[in-house]
Amino acid sequence: MKSLAIIALTMGGAKLASAIIKNVSEHKFTVFIPASLASKELTLGDITIRQFDNSLKDEVKKQYPHYDGFIMIMALGIVVRVFAPLINHKKIDPPVLCLDEKGQHVISVLSGHLGGANQLTRQLAKKLGANAVITTATDVNNTLAFDEIAKNHQLSIEPFANLKYFNSAMVHQEKVLVYYDICLSNRLTEELTRVNIQLRHYQEFTANSYNHSLCCLITNKLHKTELKLDKLLYLRPVNLIIGVGCRRNVPASAIIKAISEACEMVQVTTASIKSLATVEIKRDELGITAAAEHFQVPVQYFSSSQLGNINEQLNLTKSNFVYQAIGVEGVCEPAALMGGKTTELILKKTVFPQITIAIAQERSM
């Protein structure tokens, strides 16, 4: 559930905010109105309302870091002027929508694909019986946008600068090939084939594949240095679980280094890490916590009995030393396997100074 701010400048806009909240239950809303409206008759039931007495520009700047998106009920020109100084990059900018106070038009203003503004625009327009105004070329031409595919299927984009070439190719109906090495969901397969994209297995890809077309690679494999990046777009699945075992008080820098080296051993990118996984007794291990923060992923903790059962079932690597220390014969391998769905080990227990690492990969999206 997203936390969205609705900012209205008039009585009509405030009432439209109430209608939005009553019709859309998928998100959490907070309504902002000028303090000057508070003295007038305004009944919005139990809706959270915040008043502001500074300028709209200052209020938006103040609230900008605290909300997942903004619905502005006012003239589009005002919205453009207010948000222009705050815009950073399409990867991180929040979605911004603009509505007239009569609710006739819902306009996607900022972060249409990655931010989800286009999707929210369609949703609001349908609920309000309004006209959805979306101007992104891929949407206008009813074709696929690779950044929207990435957002909808939890794929990271690399290199981001190439995105515009691939979206442009889709608009102009140019040939794009997609190579993959994991089991794609039925939904993603349908979305790609709907626009006549040819799907091929990653093993078929060579340096000559992009001589006559752009190539998108859905894989966690590291980039090969001999490939021309200007012809490629990587969509990175988040499907790696890093099993971690370590001695007490190992510094985060050592764990980060071990994880990075382990990924390089099996030629996978750290951008595809979904989580770290370890034994419950390590919940207070600051090095593991900090390493997870470095890779911007959560840590999953499993009990000794859970790990022990997996060890026995799959006959994984066993260590008497580890058993004597924490009561389970192995941590990193069973933790990695338990951390995801339909997992397989792509790196068995590998020993680094005071650290053990194993890597499991989810077979499908």
Image (cartoon, rainbow, N blue to C red):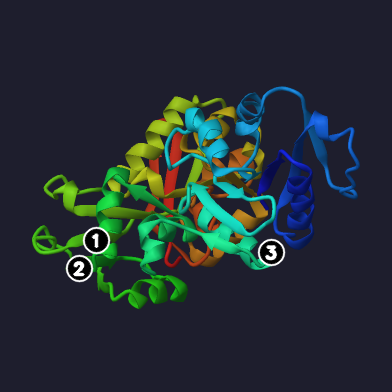
**Dot 3 alpha-carbon crowd within 10 angstroms: few under 14, some 14 to 19, many 20 or more:** some
The picture places residue 26, in percent across and down from the top left corner, at 70, 59
Observer-nearest residue: 300 or 159?
159
Which of pointers 2 and 3 indicates the residue nearer the eye?
A: 3
Residue type at mark 2?
Answer: Lys
Does residue 84 appear to the left or right of 351 in the view shown?
A: right
Does residue 118 appear to the left or right of 75 in the view shown?
A: left
Observer-nearest residue: 33 or 271?
33
Residue type at mark 3?
Answer: Leu
Q: Secondary structure at mark 1?
A: helix
Query: Pointer 2 and pointer 3: residues touching (CB < 8 Å)?
Result: no
Distance Cα–Cα, label 2 vs label 1: 7 Å
Dot placed on the residue nearer the N-terminal end, 2 or 3: 3
Query: Pointer 2 and pointer 1: residues touching (CB < 8 Å)?
Result: yes
Residue type at mark 1?
Answer: Ala
Rendered residue at 77%/57% (across/down): 19
**Dot 2 alpha-carbon crowd within 10 angstroms: few under 14, some 14 to 19, many 20 or more:** some
The numbered disc on residue 128 is: 3
Rendered residue at 48%/32% (across/down): 84
Q: Is residue 352 visible?
A: no
The numbered disc on residue 169 is: 1
The picture places residue 31, in percent across and down from the top left corner, at 76, 42
**Dot 1 alpha-carbon crowd within 10 angstroms: few under 14, some 14 to 19, many 20 or more:** some
Distance Cα–Cα, label 3 vs label 1: 34 Å
Dot placed on the residue nearer the N-terminal end, 2 or 1: 1
Rendered residue at 49%/67% (across/down): 342
Which of pointers 3 and 1 indicates the residue nearer the eye?
A: 3
Observer-nearest residue: 213 or 229?
213
Q: Badge 2 is on which residue?
A: 175
Q: Secondary structure at mark 2?
A: loop
The picture places residue 109, in percent across and down from the top left corner, at 50, 47
